[in-house]
Amino acid sequence: MALRGPAGLGPGSRRPLDEAVAGAEGREAPALVAAGGAPEDDEEDDGRGRGLLRWDGFSAWLHCVCVVGFDLELGQAVEVIYPQHSKLTDREKTNICYLSFPDSNSGCLGDTQFCFRFRQSSGRRVSLHCLLDQFDKDLPVYLKKDPAYFYGYVYFRQVRDKTLKRGYFQKSLVLISKLPYIHFFHTVLKQIAPEYFEKNEPYLEAACNDVDRWPAPVPGKTLHLVLCCHPGWTSTFRAQAILPLQCFCPVFLHSQMLWELVLLGEPLVVMAPSPSESSETVLALVNCISPLKYFSDFRPYFTIHDSEFKEYTTRTQAPPSVILGVTNPFFAKTLQHWPHIIRIGDLKPTGEIPKQVKVKKLKNLKTLDSKPGVYTSYKPYLNRDEEIIKQLQKGVQQKRPSEAQSVILRRYFLELTQSFIIPLERYVASLMPLQKSISPWKSPPQLRQFLPEEFMKTLEKTGPQLTSRIKGDWIGLYRHFLKSPNFDGWFKTRRKEMTQKLEALHLEALCEEDLLLWIQKHTEVETVDLVLKLKNKLLQADREHLPVKPDTMEKLRTHIDAIILALPEDLQGILLKTGMT
């Protein structure tokens, strides 16, 4: 996905950014396009020229911007919420307060950036930009919105200040959004946060006003986004699936096992020295099964104050399917009963060869100070791919750039996931009824039932061995996967898409019929019933964004109009008032 952002000279300036944001997964994804900052474009950029209300443009990108500071009496507190009309529940504010600061043991001096994710309070109204949801289906899974969650993008500053009682200046600028554009928002923060800490609220207000003028993030376009920043700032940055090799460096000998754990939705804890390393590693794990979506919960940074702390740490039931990133030593004891724990040390600077950690037994993990390692008793279904390990080790020896190493690892995970998912896609496609079975005068046919044993039989001839060199117990891996939240979410999504396709084919079949001939052979009551059903079909196609060609919709409207005109005038008046034709 490409995102172009512009920088200006200051709060009142409008100068376009020059550089594009390249796509992820080693390929170009649908681009997000924005119009630039030329004066003649002001009306269009403003958004009011597009029929949008004040702050509609802002809410397409962000829910709000928060400033979290440290109060000696209250502790962390939200000092500013902008725009001021933004709604946050007390529970959401509490989560933002604690998730916006590193744990005290992290010792983050200077500027730190990281990401967190938290559950929205129930009963929240649907965003005005729900109309943009139809574009979501065109995006890669790692760029799709989370309807039930908010992301928090943090720029935290902690510096010595003798004028303050505490002796330190501690403050976070936080962007709250439903959009998982990790690199994009981190880059935006990197430009506006240092300026904000110097100029305070007027600068923040100017930045938010600029965001309100941004066009909506629609796939397929490249956006020139005006933002008040440093003079002459230009930068190239990526809104990509987070999968930097740096996160996997200490564990790349076990990366295939971690891929299995994420694929199967196993409970997984990442214990890291800082929120930055915690959030990067969790996001890398979630994205390692792309293009398959990770359907369970994941928290890039999780604290003991989180509203789901009790739910996720209770010992009265099995650990939930979730990936948690933590930094507090308290979790080493609290989550000791979890089956899979990754303990990572300080990440080495680019170019240094990290020491490879070992797989260790859980009983050896007593404190967060325990040695780095993967603590689990899990036995992988698949044999380890020695080829990819040799390739990455050779890259380290030859001092291959980390970006190139990351591309190799991303491609490996992508091919592994595709090899796994293709047999499932092929079998699910066979559940689709034949097109000749679709009759315009009957309800669309139902999909055949997914039968696990029937699917297993297909693997002998059309299994992953056709596209993957990896040996092992693929059947066992599939059996485990079919019981996981990731399969449940994937299959529900595929079933919905296929059901919508059947509805679309049914609409096309109706359009091909001579409906005027049909009404000559049927009563007025049956004709009125047909018109009402056709109108409902149109509403359904619009509401559910069915994959129907525009000319099919237009043809159906023409059919409806023709049928109504063939009826007596009194019925015409009634039917014309009933919905849109």
Image (tube, rainbow, N blue to C red):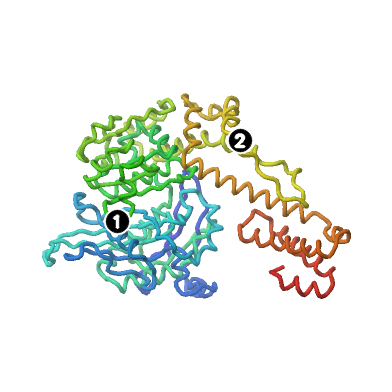
Q: Earlier in the sequence, mark 1 or mark 2?
A: 1
Q: Which of 76 and 235 is in front in this view?
A: 76
Which residue is rendered at x = 83% and y = 75% of the image?
A: 569
Label 1, on which residue? 99
In the picture shown, does residue 42 fall above or below 367? below
Which residue is rendered at x = 71% and y = 63% of the image?
A: 535
Residue 141 lies, in percent from the top left, at 49, 48
Q: Report the number of numbered marks.
A: 2
Q: For the residue marked with disc 1, what is the amino acid?
A: Leu
Residue 179 lies, in percent from the top left, at 44, 57
Residue 104 lies, in percent from the top left, at 19, 53
Label 2, on which residue? 427
What is the quadrant of residue 516 in the picture?
bottom right
In the picture shown, does residue 100 fall above or below 457? below
- 535 displayed left or right of 307: right
- 322 displayed left or right of 480: left
Spatial CA distance of label 1 from label 2 is: 43 Å
Single out the residue that lies furthest toward the front.
316
Q: For the residue marked with disc 2, what is the amino acid?
A: Tyr
What is the quadrant of residue 546 in the picture?
bottom right
Which residue is rendered at x = 30% and y = 54% of the image?
A: 306
- 173 displayed left or right of 509: left
Q: Which mark is residue 413?
A: none
In the picture shown, does residue 295 fall above or below 82? above
Q: Is mark 2 on a helix, strand or loop?
A: helix
Q: Which of 301 and 347 is in front in this view?
A: 301
- 402 displayed left or right of 422: left
Residue 394 lies, in percent from the top left, at 36, 30
